[in-house]
Amino acid sequence: MPLAPRPGLTVGASSAASKAAASDGGSPIKAAYFDIGNVLLRFDPTKVGRRLAWEVRRRPLKVLSYLWDSSFGERIETGRIGSRALYGLFRKELGFQGTYRRFKRLWCDAFEFRVDRKAVSILRRLSREIPVYLLSNTNHLHFDHIRRRYAFVRLVRRSFVSHRMGLRKPDAAIYKAALAEAGVKPHEAFFVDDLKENVEAARRVGMKALRYDKPESLEKELRGLGLLNARTAKRPRAAARTGSKPGTAAGPPSPSA
């Protein structure tokens, strides 16, 4: 099940919604959904492959081919392969010889996540205007790691994550479920993701959607919808992650896509 809603994040929602309605000529945007991987947290898949390959003494391409296999990724991200079962597969299929504790650390650290501080700043500012949610393909170990380590998770009303819902993007059902749980209609919702197929799927459902490439494009889109303006802009805080230097992190699959 997704995380419970956070109460009280309604400051400025009505005024922002009115601006969105006026600028768009239609229904107001009442909620926004953010992907995590390569939107709020950056990572390099080739580095993931090298790190894991070194640990199991295999070629990076072989390790990546195994991890990104569509059926394997789907089973992990929809929760059908649990953490202990995943550890067992790593031992059996890739020859990993470490302890379960070592595996958990490796699984979360391999991504070397880097906070996109400008994107997180936009999420923070937007959360003061309308309800904001996370909508991400991930798995238990990764999301638990992210939830404990990164402060932006506490800015959102609720986290819709694939391993808890038993669904993953770009399946239309996950968008519809996230919309229904938030009590908004598709045309009242904005979605941002780095993957083309996920953005196109959201648009087919009826959501306004943007493929993320850089924070400046995201800010421009949200300003065009009347959800952000120059007065809400603030310089990003020194660190978006608790207990660490800014812009550093740890944290396949899941790219938390």
Image (spheres, rainbow, N blue to C red):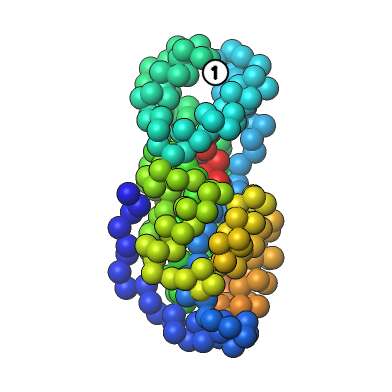
Q: Report if residue 15 is visible in the image.
A: yes
Q: Is residue 242 left or right of residue 226?
A: left
Instruction: Please rate how many residues cluster around mark 1, counting C-alpha atoms within 10 Å: few if below 14, some from 14 to 19, many from 20.
Output: some
**Residue at 61%, 78% in the rendered image:** 225
Above/below status of 186 relative to 54: below
Quadrant for residue 146, please give it.
top left
* Residue that carries the numbered disc 1 in the rendered image: 55
Residue 112: horizontal and vertical position, in percent? 56, 37
Q: Report if residue 238 is visible in the image.
A: no
Callout 1 secondary element: helix
Residue closer to the observer: 146 or 93: 93
Residue closer to the observer: 26 or 219: 26
Q: Amino acid at mark 1?
A: Glu
Residue 77: horizontal and vertical position, in percent? 47, 38
**Residue at 41%, 18% in the rendered image:** 88
Residue closer to the observer: 238 or 83: 83
**Residue at 53%, 49% in the rendered image:** 171
Residue closer to the observer: 102 or 178: 178
Q: Is residue 207 left or right of residue 179?
A: right
Above/below status of 190 relative to 167: below
Above/below status of 28 relative to 120: below
The total number of labels drawn is 1
**Residue at 59%, 18% in the rendered image:** 54
Residue 38: horizontal and vertical position, in percent? 60, 48
Residue 61: horizontal and vertical position, in percent? 68, 22
